[in-house]
Image (spheres, rainbow, N blue to C red):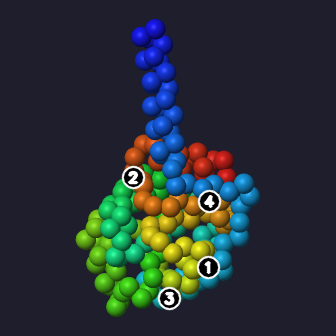
Amino acid sequence: MKKFLMTVCILVLTAAAATAREDGVNIYDTPREPPATPIYTDTGKKVNLTDFKGDFLIAVFWSRYCGPCLRELDNLERYQQIVRNDGIRVILISPDTEWSTVEEMKKMLKKYRAGDLEAYTDVNGRLASDFGIFTSPNTVLINKDGKEIGRLRGSAEWDSAEVVEYLYKLKAEHN
């Protein structure tokens, strides 16, 4: 009887851990066209999310005033280092109204150990608004065909083995 109860407890804990890991993730049944609203590079070049076709894109909408956003920046940097040669690309998207200059944003990313991540600005938060995103952090997952396949609300331990494995699985299923 003791062995049976122990087995049941292990199964319940395993299921709870799997649910917690995927909490806040919403994967769509059918991929969606992302808004065509542009974002801007550090040199001011206009870019659309569809310009990233060919890569599995993890587009993280963040704010400099968001504690969870700042806490996950170094995790995102380490995650990008792990997956960089596997067709997975991480980009950061922040409202342009939060920065006096692009250099200010770059300096802050360096401070939070995320200086190598691609960072883009969103004029007046238009792209975020067009996605219906009004809180940070919020992550949009886009397949290699340039279609949105899902979202993650809130922060994540990006470089944890579970998250890395889960995102590789999503990439394989949706590319």
**Secondary structure found at label 1:** helix
Name the amino acid, label 4: Gly
State the CA–CA distance, disc 1 to disc 3.
11 Å
Name the amino acid, label 3: Asn
Mark whose residue sits in front, 1 or 2: 1
The residue that disc 1 covers is 130
The residue that disc 3 covers is 124
Locate residue 109 relative to residue 33 in the image: left or right. Answer: left
Residue lying furthest left: 111
User: Residue 16 at x, y = what percent?
Assistant: 48, 37
Q: Residue at x 51, y 88 (%)?
A: 123
User: Label 3: how many residues lie within 10 Å, few (<14), some (14-19) or many (20+)?
Assistant: few
Q: Mark 4 or mark 1: name the one nearer the start of the chain.
A: 1
User: Residue 91 at x, y = what percent?
Assistant: 48, 69
The residue that disc 2 covers is 157
Name the amino acid, label 2: Glu
User: Label 4: how many residues lie within 10 Å, few (<14), some (14-19) or many (20+)?
Assistant: some
Residue lying furthest bottom: 100
Q: Mark 1 or mark 3: name the one nearer the start of the chain.
A: 3
**Secondary structure found at label 3:** helix
The residue that disc 4 covers is 150
Whether label 3 touches label 2, CB < 8 Å: no
Picture quarter with the C terminus: bottom right
Q: Residue at x 52, y 42 (%)?
A: 19
